């Protein structure tokens, strides 16, 4: 009779240990990218703050970015960078990419800024990333349509 309570207690302990998780599951999700800010420099070039988002449950190493940029259906050129940046799980970081836009895109954006209007943009291409713990670099296809608006009181800056 004295052992009667110990057997259920041991079974309960074994059950709880079996149900406990060994940590966060290793889930790799496709990353995302967006333009956080576009600044027109005095010489007409653009400085683009590109936001890289890691939706994975583990840190990812972002090796390269190659994204075709279109502004109001006007091809502006290719955003290319090799950030070699590690982004933690379910986090984001921003890289600054110098950019020399096409003459037509440059004129279009100058006109929009002069009128105080924003622009539609599209980025389409690839991000090369890999888990930091193991695994090879993989190309992830990226496609995003969004909009940038002028920042009040800050000439030449859109967010």
Image (tube, rainbow, N blue to C red):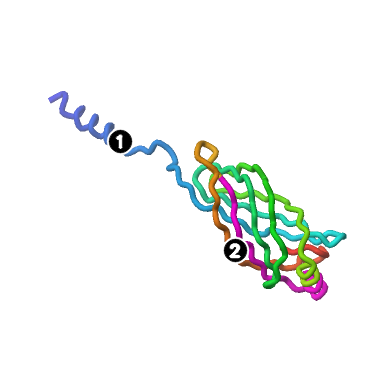
Q: Position of residue 64 (x, y in %)?
A: 63, 48
Seen from the viewer's position, the closer of residues 79 and 39 is: 79
Q: Position of residue 15 (x, y in %)?
A: 27, 36
Q: Position of residue 31 (x, y in %)?
A: 55, 52
Work out which quarter of the rendered image holds the N terminus and state it.
Answer: top left
Q: Disc 2 and disc 1: Cα gap in Å?
A: 43 Å
**Which residue is outermost to the bottom?**
115
Check if residue 119 falls in the magenta segment.
yes
Q: Which residue is mark 2?
A: 144
Quadrant position of residue 37: bottom right
Check if residue 35 falls in the magenta segment.
no
The local secondary structure at tag 2 comes to strand
For discs 2 and 1, the disc positioned in front in the rendered view: 2
Considering only order in the chain, which callout, 1 or 2, is on the residue closer to the N terminus? 1
Disc marking residue 78? none
Which residue does the image show at 50% across and 40% down from the upper left?
A: 135
Work out which quarter of the rendered image holds the C terminus and state it.
Answer: bottom right
The local secondary structure at tag 1 comes to helix
Q: Residues within 10 Å of mark 1 (few under 14, many from 20)?
A: few
Relative to 94, residue 110 above or below: below
Which residue does the image show at 59% across and 52% down from the upper left?
A: 127
The magenta span reads 109-129
Which residue does the image show at 35% across and 37% down from the upper left?
A: 20
Seen from the viewer's position, the closer of residues 45 and 20 is: 45
Seen from the viewer's position, the closer of residues 45 and 34 is: 45
Lateral position of residue 58 relative to residue 116, left or right: left
Q: Which residue is mark 1?
A: 18
Q: Position of residue 78 (x, y in %)?
A: 69, 59
**Which residue is outermost to the right?**
42
Q: Residues within 10 Å of mark 2 (few under 14, many from 20)?
A: some
């Amino acid at each position: 009779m004295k052992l009667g309570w110990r057997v259920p207690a041991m079974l309960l302990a074994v059950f709880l240990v079996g149900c406990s998780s060994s940590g966060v599951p290793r889930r790799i999700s496709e990353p995302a990218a967006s333009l956080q800010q576009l600044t027109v420099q005095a010489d007409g070039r653009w400085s683009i703050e590109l936001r890289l988002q890691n939706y994975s449950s583990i840190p990812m190493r972002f090796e390269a970015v190659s994204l075709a940029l279109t502004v109001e259906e006007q091809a502006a050129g290719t955003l290319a960078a090799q950030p070699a940046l590690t982004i933690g799980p379910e986090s984001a970081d921003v890289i600054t990419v110098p950019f020399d836009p096409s003459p037509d895109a440059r004129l279009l954006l100058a006109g929009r800024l002069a009128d105080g209007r924003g622009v539609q943009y599209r980025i389409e291409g690839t991000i090369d990333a890999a888990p930091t713990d193991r695994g090879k670099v993989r190309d992830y296809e990226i496609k995003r349509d969004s909009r940038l608006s002028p920042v009040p009181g800050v000439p030449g800056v859109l967010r």
